[in-house]
Image (cartoon, helix red, strand yellow):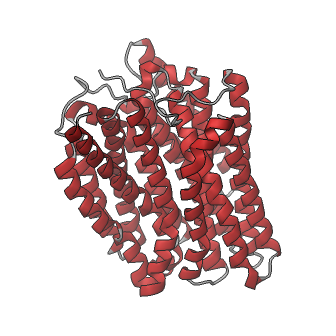
Amino acid sequence: MLPGEDRAARRVLMVCMAAGATTLLDQSVLNIAVPALRRSLDAGATDVQWIVAGYSLTFGLMLVPGGSLGDVHGRKWLFLVGLSAFVLFGAVAATGTRPDVVIAARLVQGAGAGLVNSQVIGTIQDVFRGLDRARALGLYAVTGGVAAALGPALGGTLVAAFGPEPGWRLCLLLNTPCGLVTLWLAFRWLPTPRRTAGRSRLDWWGLAWTGALTLALMLPFISTPDSAPQAALWAGGAVGLACCLALEQRSRMRSGRVPLVHPSLPRSRPYTLGTAVAMASFGSSLAATLVLTMFLQSGLGLSALTAALVTLPSAVAMGVSSAVAWRVVRRLGPHTVTLGLALGILTLLGGAAVALTAPRAALPLGLAAVQLLSGAAAGLTIAPNQALVLQHAPAEAAGVAGGILQMAQRIAAAVALSAVSGSYLHGTTGSTGSPRTAFAHASLVCAGLLAAATVLSLLRPRLTGDRRPPRLSGHGHPYAAPAREEA
């Protein structure tokens, strides 16, 4: 690169990292303010689940169409539109006086965040090549992860400093100054819009079936079935929607049209196994963080600031472990992810044990120690697994592989958030409800998700024949991603 080009690329990367941090911080910063929001709006358990899970749902569903629209119409203006909607409806949610208003605003906010992040992925792949692209994608992933880990600490500080009622509203307004600065920088520094595809080939029906299937998986946890026949009806509906999606995808392939999920992606064992691992670990991480903050405040009656201090070690440990993860990858290869998942399981089991046995006075310190290990586990899992997944994406589907991966993670998060938070909330109701027991049960559910991911991660080298460390490029950086194919 020429010096001027290198400077322009660094500015683009700065905008992409700021956008990722802003949109991913927004969800985690609200988690710690959920008890205050619930009391302020007199929101029920169902409202809370929609507020926290709806954001992930629309975020995930917008990633693929956003990427397709960016290919056709250029990325800069779609980035600005998505971020503007994100900021505007963040203000609507922050000033809402009814749960339904907050829910609707969060759904639109999630769609805006998905539109922004799909342009971020495409922009990085358009601007950077080779090792520079690998580093940019790695920095984007780590920045988003650390921002999400810092969210509870920032949220707790706001609630503690300004009180519950203004505090949860300020948590939702926190993205406003960040978003406005990012908008200004994006307007100045993002490259001029250009098309990379002649026309949109998006599978809108496939996206609709995917959204319906996700809702069918979420709703039983949000509105618990009253009887076995009703539960069977929900299960049958989910199976039926899955069949409809599979038939629709097969029909598009037979007619020569491009399906939502490129046919080469399901045939790639490394990609499908890695995506399944990412779905389980991402959903488990977000759900465990949400339940922890609810347990500390609603269950134990601790202040938001105390809850923030308990979660802070996770952010610190994740930042450190993410920075050194590539050294571990060079030695262990795909087993780095397995190591991170196994450590994550131990931390969740440890958290459950602490909640059930520790004296009340020792609980915050014990859970803070668990969070330190949890952050280290996340740093060893997130970016290395993403690198391994995208490295093995088939060349003919390289352009959509990242979008499908992120969409799968967000959809898994929507289901996990609704399921695990529902398990905790229902476990705390009634005369026999115990917050400690409910938290332990929710932690075991999250540990079960990570256990399934660990099995897949252990099987990955055997099933794919890839027992070596990932291919290194340049100076040995392992976070390499495939080149984007442009239509």
Which is nearer the eye, 398 or 235?
398
Horizontal relation, residue 173 to residue 224: left or right: left
Residue 408, position as x, y percentages in the image: 51, 40
Residue located farthest toward the right when viewing the structure as drawn? 357
The answer to whether residue 248 is seen in the rendering is yes
Residue 138, position as x, y percentages in the image: 46, 43
Which residue is at 33% across, 43% downward?
Answer: 120
Residue 318, position as x, y percentages in the image: 57, 57
Horizontal relation, residue 348 to residue 327: left or right: right
Quarter location, residue 268: top right
Say if 51 sits above or below 67 in the image. Answer: below
Residue 28, position as x, y percentages in the image: 49, 63
Horizontal relation, residue 474 to residue 413: left or right: left
Which is nearer the eye, 366 or 474?
474
Which is nearer the eye, 335 or 401?
335
Say if 126 sits above or below 96 in the image. Answer: above
The quarter of the image holding the C terminus is: top left
Which residue is at 45% across, 53% downward?
Answer: 144
The quarter of the image holding the N terminus is: top left
Which residue is at 38% across, 13% downward?
Answer: 256
Quarter location, residue 22: bottom left
